[in-house]
Image: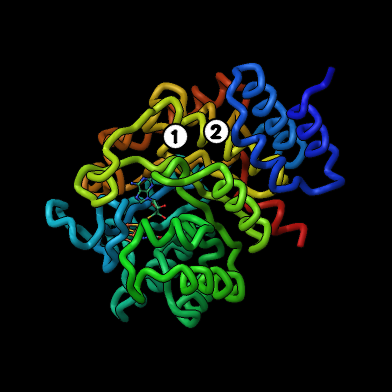
Amino acid sequence: MKNRLDDILAKALEEKDVLEHDELKHLLTCEEPGELAALYRAAYRMKERHIGRKVSLRGLVEMSDLCVKDCYYCGIRRSNRAVPRFAMTRDEILRAVRLAREYGYSSIVLQSGERSDPAFVDFVEEIVREIKRIDDFGITLSCGEQSSETYRRWFAAGAHRYLLRIESSSRTLYRTLHPDDAMHDWETRRRCLDFIRDAGFQLGTGVMIALPRQTADDLASDLEFFREVDADMIGMGPYLPHHQTPLGREFPELDAEKTLETGLKMIAAARLYLRDVNIAATTALQTLSPADGRERGLLAGANVVMPNIGDTAYRRGYQLYENKPDLDENLPEIRRKLEASLQSIGETVAEGWGDSPHFASK
Ligand code: SAH
Ligand code: SF4
């Protein structure tokens, strides 16, 4: 007799009706190895259908760990005095981008701690222009909450994708992760997603997975939130405790295998539910399982990988969480390993910018 999971997977693959909250929750709570394998298999079929067996690469530049915010989970939060602060110069960023071009990257992600002072806004605008002068790169920005005008300026300069995770769609859970003040306000962050979309960007959002106090209902609601804001790209990853943060001190334990499993289930459920969006296999997966975390993410339905292309000298400063992989690896090494690992799972690197098919279909 067919079980409930089979029915839900068949319904998802039929692409006629949208999965209900309880069905998403069922996907997220299955635990038996045979069921997990069936879930990942179905999600991979959906990916093959809409994306192919292809992975889009983004060269990630972590520009600076200066941040005005104090998120309770993040290693580079303002109050963490133990972090060495850095800001890459214009020339350092451009050097990284030129090197990335040599190694075949056609898309770049610029990420940083959050600042919205005029000097920073000008700097990002200028750097986007300069990168576009080097080559016609696809440029994604991930520099936090900004004014509508700032997003418009950065889009006009040539960036065309923006990542801003909502962190959790639950206002209650969000409150437990951030100080209760105007700078850390869920509604403001939610409004920024509209600003980003209205400025013309392809919209990326996401959440942290396996957070303390997070339930399967919360995660199912996160998926529903992604559909509600009509996200083009999903960048979500397991939460990893950092011992120099309030949340990491309160909940220092980490069950790596369980956390990885929850992360993979979210990827698979997101693929089945949202179908044609770009989904990243984030570095946090690789941190939890250096040997195969990223590959397992791709086999569960993800289609984007963002290897770090910044100078190795800075990577230690940008520790949102601890034990990030690839800290000392240079570009050729990272690229070689990546190609080998993709080959081992029968995937190849996609050509071009690798834009979200979801955005193209609008
Ligand atoms: N400052 C920007 C971008 C850099 S932070 C912003 O906050 O949007 C990028 C992402 O890192 C955050 O959205 C958060 O989801 C993630 N992050 C921070 N600390 C983390 C941790 N301890 N474990 C997992 N992800 C974390
Ligand atoms: Fe700053 Fe982003 Fe970290 Fe929050 S998550 S402290 S905004 S870098």
Inspect this view and state whether residue 134 appears. no
Assign the N terminus to one quadrant of the image: top right
Image marks 2 and 1: residues in contact by CB distance under 8 Å: yes
Tell me where residue 102 appears, x and y as whole percent. Answer: 43, 43
Mark 2 → mark 1, Cα distance in angstroms: 8 Å
Instruction: Return the residue nearer the eye: 175 or 37.
Output: 175
Q: In which quadrant of the rendered view does residue 113 lie?
A: bottom left
Q: Which mark is residue 168?
A: none
Coloring scheme used: rainbow
Q: Kindly state the secondary structure of the residue where label 2 is placed.
A: helix
- Ligand 2, by image quadrant, is bottom left
User: Residue drawn at (27%, 56%), measured in percent from left and top?
Assistant: 92
Residue found 50% across the figure and 80% down from its top: 148
Residue 338 seen: yes
Q: Assess disc 1: are there few (<14), some (14-19) or many (≥20) residues with their C-alpha within 10 Å of its C-alpha.
A: many
Q: Which residue is mark 2?
A: 264
Q: Which mark is residue 285?
A: 1
Give x and y (percent) for residue 26: 67, 36
Q: Nearer the viewer, residue 266 or 107?
A: 266
